[in-house]
Amino acid sequence: MMKSEIKTAIVLVVVIGAAIAGIQGVLVSLDDAAPATDAALTAAPPTETSASDSPAQPKIDKSRFKTAPEIVGIFEYINTTPDGLEEAIKDKVVLYDIWTYSCINCIRTLPYITAWDDKYADEGLLIVGVHSPEFEFEKNPDNVRMAVEKYGIKYPVVMDNEMDTWKAFENRYWPRKYVADHEGYIRYDKIGEGGYDDTERVIQNLLRERAASLGLQTAAAEPLVDIKSFEHTLVRTPELYFGYQFAFGRNQLGSEEGFKPESIVEYGEPKSIDLDKFYMTGEWKNRSDSMELVSDTGRIQLYYNAKEVNIVTENAAELKVTIDGKPVPADLAGSDIMPGGLVSVSGPDLYNLVSADSASTHLMQIDVSGQGFQIFTFTFG
């Protein structure tokens, strides 16, 4: 009887041990299948030696990585052609930068991206700017070409006007960077600004991996690009939209007349002004993506908290900007402010009104002269 019980106990121990091992095996497989984060590569960087004497590289299981989708639905190709781009992508490490030219967050990333292009293009990096527009004027090839020239972009830019490539990447953000290895697997994904050192290290590692795979000589380690990045104010006024469709679900327009889609509204002087809301004075047409000045003159007021203020506008006008009832002081003046707080706007673009070392709260007033002037958004930093 005792021997029978001992045998039964031994069998139970074996069964339990096997079950635990099985569970651990399942947990390990689930962990291996987890998607890559935007923090780092999963592959260790190859040793930096020439291809002829480099050690065998560990085989990387890429089954958990997605491949980069095809670039589709392109309206216009800048700095490239359809066939030229298709050929250029082959066997390259590719950084896909999804951006749009009036987005300040996108603009702040461009010095890094253009520097990486200068630094690594000859080593096998290809940068593709996927220009996916937020506003209608960003669909104009002439406007995008001017932006490409303004920011010194030499790499291919494709105009994704109907957001087809945006959708193919299942993207929802500006800006967003995907880095694919030379076999087309997406190995890194970065949303928004920042993370520049991590992104560049991924580029370096994937270029070494590519060189080892293709039997090429690898370059010596290089220092990372050193550019002072913009530091956001943690608590700041959110982006404010003037178009009724863009502002839907946001309580941002403080004027009591409110939005009246596709109608001309005569806005009166506000009785009071709340923080993080904008107020209109004059006759303005409510458009889906903007407000258009119908009267000869108009006014925009807001209380904001930030260290940087930008506006996105279209059509010619003269703006007079005051802060707390006075001309913009020198320590707050943005790059587009002229003496006396004047700003001359013309083509559709982003204009910098305030740029300070630290955040503060102020009443901004913009007096507008120029029928047909359109304003799309305020952005803050």
Image (spheres, helix red, strand yellow):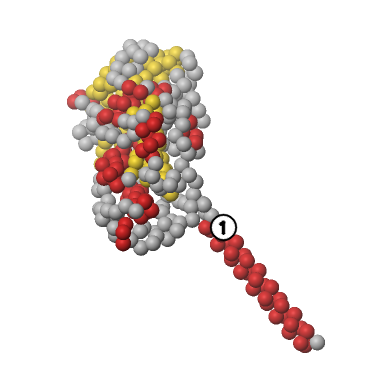
Q: Is residue 258 left or right of residue 93?
A: right
Q: Is residue 226 left or right of residue 277?
A: left
Quadrant that contains the C terminus = top left
Does residue 199 lie above or below 344 as drawn?
A: below
Q: Is residue 298 visible?
A: no
Residue at horizontal 34%, vertical 31%?
80
Judging depth in this view, the residue of 42 and 372 nearest the camera is 42
Residue at horizontal 36%, vertical 29%?
81
Q: Residue furthest right?
A: 1
Coordinates of residue 122 in the picture (x, y in percent): 28, 44
Judging depth in this view, the residue of 301 and 180 nearest the camera is 180
- Helix, strand, or loop for circle 1? helix
Does residue 122 lie above or below 283 as drawn?
A: below
Q: Is residue 39 left or right of residue 355?
A: right
Q: How many marks?
A: 1
Residue bearing mark 1 = 30
Residue at horizontal 29%, vertical 59%?
49
Picture quadrant of residue 310:
top left
Q: Is residue 123 visible?
A: yes
Q: Residue furthest bottom?
A: 2
Coordinates of residue 307 in the picture (x, y in percent): 30, 38
Coordinates of residue 253 in the picture (x, y in percent): 44, 26
Coordinates of residue 248 in the picture (x, y in percent): 50, 28
Residue at horizontal 29%, vertical 47%?
123
Q: Residues within 10 Å of mark 1 (few under 14, many from 20)?
A: few
Quadrant that contains the N terminus = bottom right
Q: Amino acid at mark 1?
A: Leu
Does residue 357 lie above or below 292 as drawn?
A: below
Does residue 271 lie above or below 56 as drawn?
A: above
